[in-house]
Amino acid sequence: MAMNPTKHIIEVVPAPTNPDIPVLTFGERVNVEALSELNAIIADLVAQKKFQVIADLTQTNHIDGSVLGVLMGFRGQAVAAKGNLILAGVTPAVEKALHVMGVHKLFDIYPAVYNAVQQFEEAARVETITLAFPSSLDFVPCVRDFISNIASMRGFEGKEAYRIQTIVDEICNNAIEHGSKESDSVINVRCTIDNDKMDLVVEDKGASKDSAEGLRRAVAKVQFTEQGKVSVEKRGRGLPIVAMLADMLEIDTRSGPGTKIHIVKFKKQENEYFTL
């Protein structure tokens, strides 16, 4: 008696709560014979530049290692394109297969498609915080800790959060020390943060051109060696340390009286020039 061939179901459907996110719904058994179908689906996703994708494994009780390998490869492409492949509804059998292959820590895994969609939407959220405080060093610790805590909540962990804290501290101190000393002067801060980076602008209203030029000279003291390390005359002081810790630093005095300092700090940089 001839046996029915194993069904390989890989259906692509939009996420119920966000149709812009494709969901790959896998059948009960996904063997090596499903590779051609999966590769065709992935090629189509890449052609459409769809790199925020969910793999729904709620119904899956067996998945071949070669299929997991293809999913791992696509996840690498997705991450490189600032996206991700998230697994949802992983059954105990599939979870065991992930552990056997040693890749269970590679994938982000959520209980259901709905939770995975929420994760993508949270990662895409951009927050902008604006505040103004009196030009006094007494207020700097509160501002520094507040922005560092926001960064921590957006995934800047450990060393990165501490570096952001240091950056904010140094820039605000410089704005106060080189800005207006009048009792009613203020420091303006704008922080825009998403899942990849923090964009910070600190502006005072009273720095002279000579003072601003002094800030530029301080930053110019930072020298990068052939080995990618940093040499600075007064290590750990003022804006030179900000130049080491940030991925971009600009000093602008063209927009009127005062100085505007703009920095960008990306998350999880591979090449670290300086360690606190």
Image (tube, grey):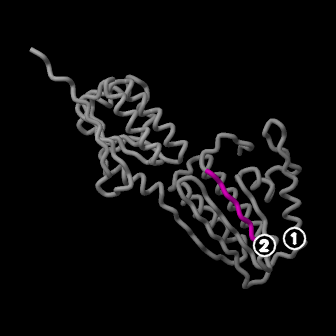
* Label 2 crowd (10 A; few <14 / some 14-19 / many >=20): many
Judge whether 239 appears above or below 101 on screen.
below
Residue 224, image quadrant: top right
Return the residue found at the far bottom.
184
**Could you tell me which residue is drawn at 80 percent across and 70 percent down?**
177
Q: Which residues are magenta?
A: 260-266
Q: In the image, what residue occupies the spot 74% across and 66% down?
A: 261
The numbered dot on residue 259 is 2
Q: Is residue 197 visible?
A: yes
Quarter placement of the N terminus: top left
Secondary structure state at the residue bearing disc 1: helix
Residue ID for mark 1? 211
Question: Which x, y percent locates residue 172?
Answer: 72, 67
Query: Overall secondary structure of the magenta stretch?
Result: strand
**Element type at marker 2?**
loop
Front residue (pair 55, 238)? 55
Q: Position of residue 141 (x, y in %)?
A: 65, 65
Which amino acid is tagged 1? Answer: Ser
Furthest-top residue in this view: 1
Of residues 257 and 2, the one nearer the viewer is 2
In the rendered image, the quadrant that contains the C terminus is top right
